[in-house]
Image: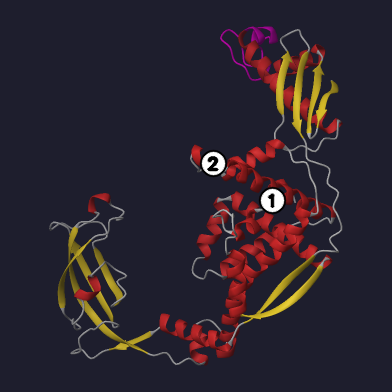
Amino acid sequence: MKVEIQSKKGLRTILSVIVDKKTIQNKMDERLNELQKEVSLKGFRTGKVPPSVIKSQFGKSIYGEVIDKILRETSAKAIEEKKIKLAGQPKIDLKTFGEGKDLNYELQIDSLPDIKLKSFEKYKAVEYKVKIEDKIIDDKLKEISVQNKQFKDKKETEKAKIGDQVVFDYSATVDGNKFEGSEGKGVQLELGKDLFLKGFDQQLVDVKKGDIKILDSILPANHPKKELANKKTKFECKILNVKESIDNKIDDNFAKIMGAKDLEDLKKLIEKQISSQYLQALNSITKKEILDQIEKNHELDLPKNLIDQEVSIMTQRLKDADKEKHKANNEKIAKSRIKLGLLLNEYGEKNNLKVSDEEVKSEIQKQIKGMPGQEKMVLEYYKKNPSASQSLKGSIYEEKIINLIKSKIKLEIKNVNTKEAEKIISEFNKPKVGQSNTKKMDSSEKNRSKSKKISKK
């Protein structure tokens, strides 16, 4: 194989690759010998078909298969030989080929730029710590108490009213006919929330334990059975019980019902949850502040194919008119994302940062803890979507890079209360004059998509 640089302009290199006909013939002979063990033709026993017969029957397709394999192998070797950092898929332009001829082709390659990272020690950023006020924690406790209200039986002679819980069995019909899902047992309904069907709750007002009540309702438009959508339905309800709500006493016992050790522990859990919600937004502001400085202080040539690819991903759901209208701005955003992705990835590689499978599993477990009752659904999602696990791995990798950068720069710690935090977040997200409708927070969260795609950590 002979490899020469045909031309080099910026990040685009064109290589000329020649594979001599003798090498190609050897590969053809090897493939014919392999096929001899597999091919079965009329008049020959399996494994005994002469290579010349196989070639006469399947020569063109075998040649194509061999050339395809040679192109893959030799292009990879050519790129490795010239020590080119590949950016995207190279393009192959066949010049001469055919049986008994040398294979001559050109390889058009877009390469990643050489990156020289500048010191981050002069950078500055603000990291926020949020103090959650006692009143906010107490208000959240009351909200949780209301959401998890308890009920006690009413007297058999007492009628149901809005706010009570009615327990009932039902049998439903459409045009006098039963249907799949037309029966229910032990349904518990808190009147006034309209969680069953629109207008259903109101018709259960004034029922008592033991009553039989006929209700009219309409099945929803999004009913899984299309033929039942928006159908008038009769429900025969047998009232099993009527219960009234009782106020929860917010104490250690209530805290234990909620899964905490005691009331103090429950308050700490609530504080941590609320604090986490604020910090998620505030940390994005800190990250954006750091990323802006990194982008401003580095100059990079960017591969055009990566820019085109990023723009294509960004605009795939837009109409052609909108793509053209916002073309310049979309290219600007794409360049910013790619540039930051390459810089962050380089910083991660230089500092030998890696993400282990255990770290990914640990992060998935954190998500599961934050979604009680949906553990199986979360696990199934990651099991069925390998790309989701890879994306999560990319996010962890990025977070490691940002944390390492934070340790190298002048980081001012600023303590704020919730009102101050809300003002900071609101100001940050307020569109500036001439800014597109894209949320400012979006650039902080998406700018590094390239670091996740490029990194093989």
Total count of labels: 2
Three-letter residue code for mark 1: Lys
Q: Mark 1 falls on what kind of element?
A: helix
Gap between marks 1 and 2, in whole Å? 29 Å
Query: Where does label 2 land, which residue?
Result: 325
Mark 1 or mark 2, whichever is nearer to me: 2
Q: Point out residue 396 in the picture as x, y percentages from the top left corner.
A: 69, 60
Q: Residues within 10 Å of mark 1 (few under 14, many from 20)?
A: many
Q: Give 225 or 110, whichever is nearer the viewer.
A: 110
Query: Where does label 1 land, which residue?
Result: 452
Q: Give 105 or 241, whichever is nearer the viewer.
A: 105
- Residue placed at 85% from the left, 52% from the top? 117
Q: Is residue 455 visible?
A: no
- In the drawing, does residue 296 fall left or right of residue 53? right
Q: Note whether 28 is above or below 170 in the view shown.
A: above
- Magenta: main secondary structure equals loop
Q: Which residues are magenta?
A: 36-56
- In the drawing, does residue 62 fall left or right of residue 325? right
Q: Note whether 388 is above or below 3 in the view shown.
A: below
- In the drawing, does residue 122 fall left or right of residue 314? right
Q: Based on the picture, tell me whether residue 161 belongs to the magenta stretch.
A: no
Three-letter residue code for mark 2: Lys
